[in-house]
Image (cartoon, rainbow, N blue to C red):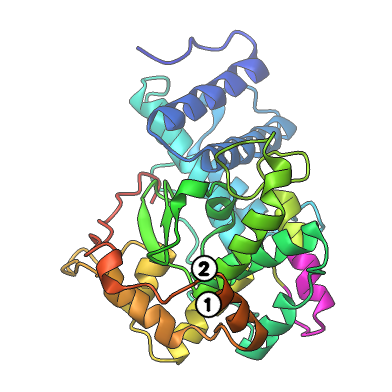
Amino acid sequence: MPYVERERSPAGGMLAYVRAYAEHLHARQYAQQTVRYQQMSLERFLAWIAERGITRITEVTRPVLQRYQRSLAYATTRGGKPLSAAGQFNRLTAVRGFFRFLTRENILLYNPASELELPRLEKRLPKDVMTAEEAELVMSQPDVTTPQGIKDRAILEVLYSTGIRRMELVNLERQDLHQSRGVLAVRQGKGRRDRFIPIGDRALLWVNKYLDDVRPELEAGDPHTLFLDPAGRKLDPHQLSRAVQKYVQQSGTGKKGRCHLFRHTMATLMLENGADIRFIQQMLGHAMLSTTEIYTHVSIVKLKEIHSATHPAKLKGTLLDLAQQRGATEPSADDVLSSLAAEALEEDEDA
């Protein structure tokens, strides 16, 4: 049975198909952010074909989709910048998945997007990656004499130490922080995969300061989420990005970026200091993409050792004294998980 009936109202009918596709993705456990982006991309596509007089989904042909693909080369973002190759790729991926769904549900007799070729993406390093000295300048920007500054410093330290994604930080819960082991649990990360990763002593120190001095004032809010806004709610990801961007700009390093800047910086600096690429993949939560590669089991004990040896953020001076006053000790290998299974290859329906 199709998810929806064939449209009576052309515009409303096509939007109903998009909503049905979004429900399909939800049912398949796609992340909420992914579903929302796919839906937005498809709504833009429907607006584009409506401007060209196409009012029924059955009128969308392969030549129409090819014209749409060419139009994306001239599309711009809300800020007026040209749409990047990655942005074009993502919008076309949404269209391909949508028409595959309609064909499988027998809403369309054939798939006009079946031979739509996606643009090749360049694999290159990010434009801006900070040096260890530049990262320290950014770390020093929050005013740690204020509750907001303490929380922001803790957030920056976690981003830098672990390289987790923005939404992974937003969704962190207090129980995900394993203090004695020096390990952070990232649950339902991208691809809905769980992983354990090391977190440095300095980051833990600032998180503890936030938990001791700031978090108790927010107890009326969400009891589980680690980082909360002043109203006791889970952080808004866009506000988080703007806050991080502000500190990067204030640092005077000339670098541009938001939360992902720390993710790239962490990986680059650890690689430069001798960390093996397999450990970096485990830290970042990247699935290995070669189907011929034998997946290894990466020990969290070894990963913690590599992190401690190669991550440039270290406790020193007054911070070290404060840590000793708190009774902080170097995590023992016996305290951490013995091993973690490497990520299995995720079959991407839209690839």
Name the residue located 78 percent from the left edge and 84 percent from the top edge: 254
Name the residue located 39 percent from the left edge and 42 percent from the top edge: 114
Which is nearer the eye, 15 or 332?
332
- Residue 248 falls inside the magenta stretch: yes
Residue at disc 2, secondary structure:
loop
Is residue 225 found left or right of 111 in the rendered image? right
Crowd rating for badge 1 (residues with CA inside 10 Å; few <14, some 14–19, many 20+): many
Which is nearer the eye, 38 or 322?
322
Q: Position of residue 136 (x, y in %)?
A: 68, 83
Residue located beneath label 1 in the image: 266
Q: What's the amino acid at mark 1? A: Met
Name the residue located 41 percent from the left edge and 55 percent from the top edge: 185
Region in magenta: 244-256
Q: Position of residue 12 (x, y in %)?
A: 65, 16
Q: Is residue 247 above or below residue 155?
A: below
Query: Do the residues bearing badges 1 and 2 touch, measured as CB atoms within 8 Å?
Result: yes
Give the total of numbered labels: 2
Which is nearer the eye, 135 or 55?
135
Is residue 294 found left or right of 254 in the rendered image? left
Q: Is residue 82 visible?
A: no
Residue at disc 1, secondary structure:
helix
Residue located beneath label 2 in the image: 163
